[in-house]
Amino acid sequence: MNFFINNFHLFCICIAMGFITYVNFKGNKKHSSDIFIILGLSLALAAFVAIEEYTRSRTDLIFLATLCSLLGYVIRPIVIYFFIRLADRERLVPCWIFIILFVINFLFYLPALFINNEALSHFAYYYVVNATNDGIEFVRGSFNFSSHILSGILLAYLVFISFRMISLKHRDDALMVLTCVLFVVIAVLLESLAIATNLLNMTISISCVFYYLFLNRDDNRRDALTRLFTRKTYYVDLAKYEKRIVGVISIDMNGLKYLNDTKGHEEGDNAIICVGKAILMSIKKDMLAYRMGGDEFLITAYSSKREELDNISNKIKNIVESSGYYCSTGVAYKDKESISYQELVELSEVEMYNDKANFYKTHRIERRKSRVI
């Protein structure tokens, strides 16, 4: 009963998140599965801590206390790993590398179970009967911090992912990940310094809630195929930032209908994804990029110069062309204050359509059917 009372807030979070992820499971099975695992492991950690605290008053349960501590040391880095799976969309590090690290961490703590062999059991940590002979005490061994070091490595990797997100123009994602990392780091330090106990599992659960809610919010703002912002987001941003926009780049694919008709819609989707990646690789921090619908894209700039916009436009076209696809672009820059934003968009579209007409003419392609003539 004490375990339930002491961890009531954790149970509430797990039940609420469990219900939300179950409802949304079909929408994103990967995220939902990872969330379920994180919540399950957090509850397991809480249970192991509760059992370990119970054994402190029993001199006959040293092995059980040792086992619970071992499971705690092994599971904590694994929980952080599943949080990494939520954040790391690119899978930069193969799964087997993490598995090797977890196995090594397990082997560091495994000797503690050999409680009848002092040389082995004192390797990482061990329990001894206290001076009053009415309970047991925890003692750190020479290699007790393996789990802490591994957790630190994983948290550092999360920070790396965050900075990579910034470079890929996913600044909101990065800020949320860094915030969650900060929560977990504080919890790890407090537990490592014995200032608090049973803190990390709760902290990870709360961070998991924050990040999952952010993912759902972010998914509603971004296009699922390209990860660019959606048309709906464009209108929301426009209402806030219209007066600050100094330049616009309009982008439209060439020959998408031909790709869909001859090679299937999957190839057409690949082409759209290619354009989205090219845009993310090319834009700068003062720009926002949107998929306006179908094969139409728009970039708004807030402090760039005309030459920078022209360079970005050409870079996008070159990246797309190097992948075997084609797109047309149009750039408009606010040289005069009297030019309205709508006029800016119209100017960029006129330039883009001129570029498109020139493309079809140069490549001797019939525009309506998108085939060579």
Image (cartoon, grey):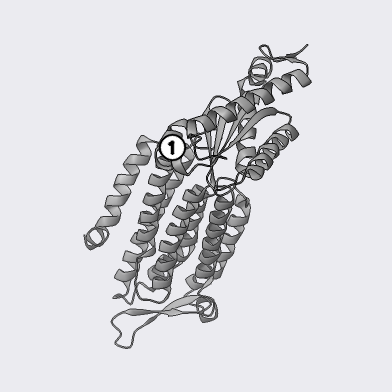
Which percent across, then down, holds residue 295? 58, 26
Which percent across, then down, holds residue 197? 34, 70
Can you identify the residue that label 1 sits on?
238
Q: As rendered, which of 66 and 167 lies closer to the eye?
A: 167
**In this image, 368 relative to 198: left or right?**
right
Tell me which amino acid carries mark 1. Answer: Leu
Position of 53 relative to 165 (above/below): below
* Quadrant holding the N terminus: bottom left
**In this image, 134 relative to 184: left or right?**
left
**In this image, 38 relative to 358: left or right?**
left
Position of 10 relative to 275 (above/below): below
Position of 326 relative to 371 (above/below): below
Crowding at dot 1, Cα within 10 Å, few <14 / some 14-19 / many 20+, comes out as: some
Q: Secondary structure at mark 1?
A: helix
Q: As rendered, which of 65 and 360 lies closer to the eye?
A: 360
Residue 134 seen from this side = yes
Q: Residue at x 29, y 87 (%)?
A: 132
